[in-house]
Amino acid sequence: MTPITAATHAAPAAQGHATIERISRTLELLQDRLSLTRRTVHAGDRVYQAGARLGCLYLVHSGFFKTVNFTSDGREQVVGLHFKGDWLGFDGIDEGRHGCDAIAMDVGQVWCIDYAALLEACSAEPSLQAAVHAAMSREIRRDRDSMLSLCTLTADARVADFLRYWADSLAERGLRTDQITLRMTRAEIGNYLGMKLETVSRALSRLARDKVIGFAEKGRRDVSIPDVGALSAFVQRSLGAGSPAAMLQ
């Protein structure tokens, strides 16, 4: 990804500056207070698996990650997406075991943080404890927003909202949003959004027809987004005009 410029994306760049500062402060706090293990991963690598004992939490330093659950018959359900600065493993704190799998979607790096050592460091450093609590709050908010999207948006709007979320996540980290490379197949996007692959493909085609998005090459994962605001406007329009029938798969 190429950094966005203030001239072309002033508002996202301003928002991104705050997120970049937050991530940098958290990384500095962790490095100052804890002994960290850096782990490089490749697409398909598992950071941890469901049922494994919780020994560490993980902070995404680079790359893109998904968290997934597996049904009893082996089907994969994507339940979360994670970008630089996001934490992995919070769901395992309660029972002491990870509740899902965390899988890399491309080459990246995670910082492995011993959980017991983190608790001790948080007790001694209130700012680190506040950073961890804020990260938990953001994850809860993302889960809530994802549920609202599934319950209230039409199929086309769900796809538009997914693209908006991906673009906003990049913008917050100082990366360009006019041309993004999705790290998920259409089937995976449908899995995450509770839609069939064919429904995702039709939604993307309609968004492209309406010039809300474009494709660099047919069938590729490179998506052009001339104006992220147009995606947001599309979602808002659907909230007023959506019908129950249109929300079905």
Image (cartoon, grey):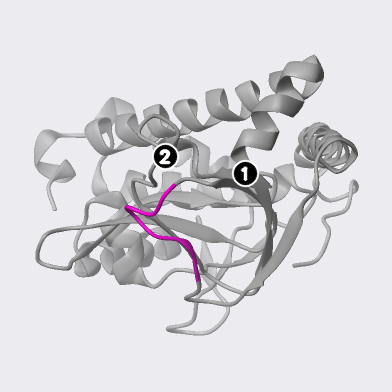
Where disc 1 sits, the SS reads: loop
Residue at 11 percent of width and 35 percent of height:
244
- Mark earlier in primary sequence (1, 2): 1
Residue pointed to by mark 1: 86
Residue at 77 percent of width and 33 percent of height:
15
Q: Identify the disc placed on residue 92.
A: 2
Residue 44 among those drawn in magenta: no
Residue 126 percent across, percent down from the top left: 78, 15
Q: Nearer the viewer, residue 48 or 52?
A: 52
Q: Nearer the viewer, residue 132 or 201?
A: 132
Q: Main secondary structure of the magenta part?
A: loop
Which range of residues does the magenta coloring cover? 46-53
> Label 2: how many residues lie within 10 Å, few (<14), some (14-19) or many (20+)?
many
Residue 175 percent across, percent down from the top left: 76, 55
Left or right, 172 with respect to 18, comes to: left
Q: Is residue 96 above or below residue 67?
A: above
